[in-house]
Image (cartoon, helix red, strand yellow):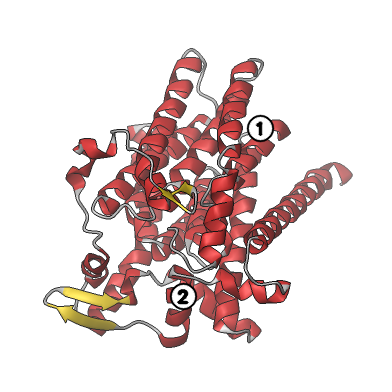
């Protein structure tokens, strides 16, 4: 009996340790976000984390959705914000009795804990060493838009569900596809960028088993379930406001008309002269440059994977890494085409491919086995570059908490 129970006890201990680390990392992020604030009272600083988009989520929780026509075919409406995150905040408010404002913040912070749990569990599944796990965590924390995880935005919920989707796809148990589909459903209900990612179950199956694996109905069921989150909201818009895709049309108010041809526009691949705000790179400049920086990062990660492991037999984690790179590239393309007419805030969206590539490279470091020198050099370069961006995150937090636009 002790031989049978020992792995269960070890797994339970590992999970509790992972949860404790996830909570600690989230508390650290909240503390950082509250540090650079005009309020002297620490308690008074917490509500100031609700600004810009989080105010929209707060009003959805309190007032629901509405549509106000401005001119023909252009609407001023909060339907541009999908329901997954405000519904989560509403559930927290209903359970705890807290105010809608605090519930919105707690929703993002609880989702951040879930994000870190899945981040660390994926690292464990790919057998990443403590050194590279720590380096990966630093790469996430140091990204200039990382503080948006804990300030009432939907970013943390979206990323938690995305990593949860990848985690359960790689679980291998009989009904793991159902857990993956549920995570995908919440993912697409949290942000519209999740819609093209519903093919991730099919992509993972292809990377794992090839074309033959696509005969299995389970990845197709997971894909269908993943799309149900966005589909339910489109149905809601049709029944309540009389139009299926009013969310997409409403984006015209913010000048974010999708343009698939944008990936061929040289304007996103040229060097731009820096422009500043408050003595620091302007957020819109970093948004413009983030397209180039993240594309370079994605290509570098894929090339490292291909050229350093091309002679090695594919490992059990190679499908996870390929899925992460595939999702990173797909997210980059979708963000570029969606934000091509208004790049403001794009650097916040680019944290998604950044995190996915960081996770992929963490798995790559494990697959390199004895040859650890190159992975260490890669991660030291990444951490050093992001450390140089610490002042940028500080200024952006200060701007955000002072009600100035960041992303």
Q: Secondary structure at mark 1?
A: helix
Of residues 19 and 106, the one drawn nearer to the viewer in this rendering: 106
Up-down: is 317 above or below 249?
above
Of residues 119 and 336, the one drawn nearer to the viewer in this rendering: 336
Position of residue 175 measured from the top left corner of the image (x, y, whole percent): 52, 54
Q: How many marks?
A: 2
Up-down: is 387 above or below 54?
above
Q: Cβ–Cβ below 8 Å for labels 1 and 2?
A: no
Which quarter of the rendered picture does the C terminus lie within?
bottom left
Pick out the residue farthest to the right: 2
* Residue 203 seen: no
Pick out the residue farthest to the front: 279
Position of residue 274 measured from the top left corner of the image (x, y, whole percent): 38, 41
Position of residue 159 measured from the top left corner of the image (x, y, whole percent): 50, 54
On residue 132, which mark appears?
1
* Residue 342 seen: yes
Q: Residues within 10 Å of mark 2 (few under 14, many from 20)?
A: some
Residue for point 48% across, 78% down: 58
Say which quarter of the image contains residue 226.
bottom left
Say which quarter of the image contains residue 306.
top left
Up-down: is 143 above or below 223?
above
Left or right, residue 182 beside residue 341: right
Of residues 152 and 119, the one drawn nearer to the viewer in this rendering: 152
Residue for point 52% across, 80% down: 90
Instruction: List the residue tagged with mark 2.
Output: 55
């Amino acid at each position: 009996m002790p031989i049978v129970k020992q792995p269960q006890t070890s797994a339970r201990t590992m999970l509790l340790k992972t949860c404790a680390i996830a909570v600690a990392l989230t508390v650290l992020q909240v503390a950082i976000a509250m540090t650079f604030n005009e309020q002297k009272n620490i308690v008074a600083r917490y509500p100031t984390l609700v600004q810009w988009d989080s105010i929209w989520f707060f009003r959805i929780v309190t007032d629901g959705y509405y549509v106000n026509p401005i001119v023909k075919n252009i609407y001023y409406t909060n339907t541009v914000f999908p329901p997954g995150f405000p519904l989560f905040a509403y559930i927290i408010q209903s359970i705890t009795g807290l105010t809608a404002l605090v519930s919105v913040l707690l929703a993002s912070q609880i989702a951040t804990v879930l994000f870190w749990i899945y981040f660390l569990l994926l690292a464990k599944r790919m057998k990443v060493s403590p050194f590279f796990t720590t380096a990966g965590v630093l790469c996430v924390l140091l990204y200039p838009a990382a503080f948006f995880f804990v300030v009432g935005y939907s970013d943390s919920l979206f990323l938690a569900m995305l990593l949860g989707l990848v985690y359960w796809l790689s679980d291998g148990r009989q009904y793991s596809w159902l857990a993956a589909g549920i995570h995908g459903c919440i993912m697409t209900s949290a942000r519209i960028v999740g819609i093209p990612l519903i093919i991730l179950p099919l992509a993972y199956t292809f990377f794992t088993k090839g074309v033959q694996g696509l005969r299995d109905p389970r990845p197709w069921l997971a894909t269908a379930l993943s799309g149900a989150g966005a589909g339910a909201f489109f149905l809601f818009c049709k029944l309540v406001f009389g139009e299926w895709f009013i969310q997409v049309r409403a984006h015209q108010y913010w000048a974010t008309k999708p343009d698939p041809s944008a990936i061929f526009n040289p304007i996103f691949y040229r060097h731009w002269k820096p422009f500043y705000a408050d003595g620091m790179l302007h957020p819109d400049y970093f948004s413009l440059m983030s397209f180039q920086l993240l594309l370079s990062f994605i290509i570098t990660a894929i090339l490292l994977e291909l050229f350093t492991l091309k002679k090695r037999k594919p490992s059990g984690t190679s499908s996870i890494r390929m899925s992460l790179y595939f999702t990173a590239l797909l997210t980059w393309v979708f963000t570029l085409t969606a934000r091509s007419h208004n790049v403001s805030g794009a650097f916040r969206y680019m944290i998604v491919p950044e995190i996915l590539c960081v996770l992929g490279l963490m798995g790559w470091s494990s697959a390199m086995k004895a040859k650890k020198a190159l992975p260490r050099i890669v991660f030291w370069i990444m951490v050093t570059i992001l450390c140089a961006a610490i002042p940028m995150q500080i200024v952006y937090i200060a701007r955000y908490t002072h009600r100035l636009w960041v992303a």
